[in-house]
Amino acid sequence: MNDQGQQYRGAWTVWIVGLAAYLLAVFHRSSLAVAGLVASERFDITAAQLSTFVMLQLLVYAGMQIPVGLAVDRFGPRAVMLAGAVVLTLSQAGFAFAESYATALTARFFVGMGDAMTFVCLLRLVNAWFSPGRIPQITLLTGPIGQLGGIIAAVPMTWAFSNLGWTKAYLFAAGLGLLVTIAVLLLVRDEPHARSVRGPALSWTRIRTSLAASWEHPGTRLGFWMHFVTQFSSTVLGLLWGYPFFVRGEHTSEAFAGMLLTLMVVAVMFAGPVLGRLIGNHPWHRSTIVLTIVSAIVVAWTAVLAWPGDAPGWLLVVMVIAVGVGGPASMIGFDLVRTSNPIDRLSTATGIVNQAGFLASLITVIAVGVILDATGQNFKAAMSFQYVLWALGLTQVWRYRVKTRARLVRDDPERWARHAGIG
């Protein structure tokens, strides 16, 4: 096999192993989606306290994105991904044995930390191993396939909690992390011609310069708000409030609620490749695609929340499909980062954007828990909080879409003239 063929095979090997690490991270992140009611009984906590699990996890995840991006640019994605796999494995094992609320919170803190050290690394590997023309498709395929971790959390974990119990279910999950760690160690290389790469040493001056240059570009900010407005609804449903909302808010059966969460993840998986091809063929209309998808999500949620009494099953199906499409749509923000930043600060800019959707999710998770406690478990009132963030996000996407186009007109008028638009 010639060098080109070996590199092609190596690219897919690295991607598959990195994807396995990301899939497991999503599983760990999503494991509370079907364990929320069990956790409430195990730790004897309120809805607001239950939301603190996910709040803390998301806060750590979002807060770690910029440090992780800087670390990847400095130490390479392989080293950071390895560290993340080890942290996830140990923290999930700790969660399995947690008997007190405080111990469980500590474990989820480290779950968020390990989770944060996975996805940015995988995107950096994709950019290092694949050709520029293939990167958008692989990027939008990566997120949806990784969401299989949500399916693993939604159906088998429901069975595991009922038949194996809390400790054994989470110990099994932790054991999978050991296998992933070994695979990353043996099979992942930072670049085709280097097992590990190192960037310039970090200093406060370099950190400030990299962050400022990344954030200064309106394309990075456009990507940030794209990620913010598209992802949070599916994340909030998948991580914590979806199962209680369907069972207690819409009075569905537990089996139907699990099916809806699984269907949402299936929608994520099918939408990813379609959106990847769409933005690959129409890169100058990325923000238009995002605006259209978010509008569909808002319409679907409005129909459910405005329905007198419990919404019919078919409408809940339509809603979770629309919400599911928002997951891969958030990946479009990373494509804006790729085309707006040089490779030496790509992971830093990616970290900035990746915290956006989780910041929005964190705010929503907290708000839903607080509103539920304040209104006596009125789920429709609690879920209506999403309109605040949709309004903010859509406004900012439109604002930075205009600014990004103006930057291109200024910096590359010939390119603008050829394509008549960006974003």
Image (tube, helix red, strand yellow):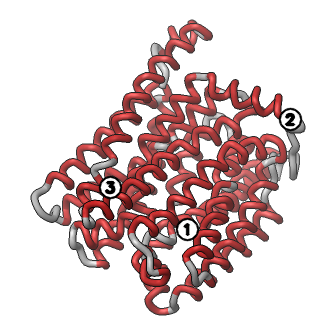
Q: Amino acid at mark 2?
A: Ser
In the rendered structure, the answer to whether residue 299 lies left or right of residue 357 reads left
Check disc 3 and give the amino acid type. Answer: Ile
- At a point 58% along the width and 87% down the height, the residue shown is 167
Residue closer to the observer: 49 or 227: 49
Assess disc 1: are there few (<14), some (14-19) or many (≥20) residues with their C-alpha within 10 Å of its C-alpha. Answer: many
Q: Is residue 190 visible?
A: yes
Residue 27, numbered label: 1
Residue type, label 1: Phe
Mark before the other along the chain sequence, 3 or 2:
2
- Residue positioned 32% across, 64% down in the render: 373
In the picture of the structure, the residue carrying the numbered disc 2 is 203
- Residue drawn at x 61%, y 64% is 25
Nearer to the camera, 386 or 10: 386
User: In the rendering, at what x and y percent does residue 55 appear?
Assistant: 51, 58
Give the number of marks. Answer: 3
Residue 119 position within the rendered picture, expressed as x and y whole percent measured from the top left: 64, 52
The correct choice, above or below, for 366 with respect to 326 in the image is below
Residue 293 visible here: no
Instruction: Give whichever of discs 1 and 3 has the lower sequence position.
Output: 1
- 315 up-or-down from 341: above or below: below
* Residue at which label 3 appears: 321
Q: Give the mark toward the camera: 3 or 2.
A: 2
The answer to whether mark 3 and mark 2 are in CB contact below 8 A is: no
Q: Residue at x 47, y 36 (%)?
A: 226
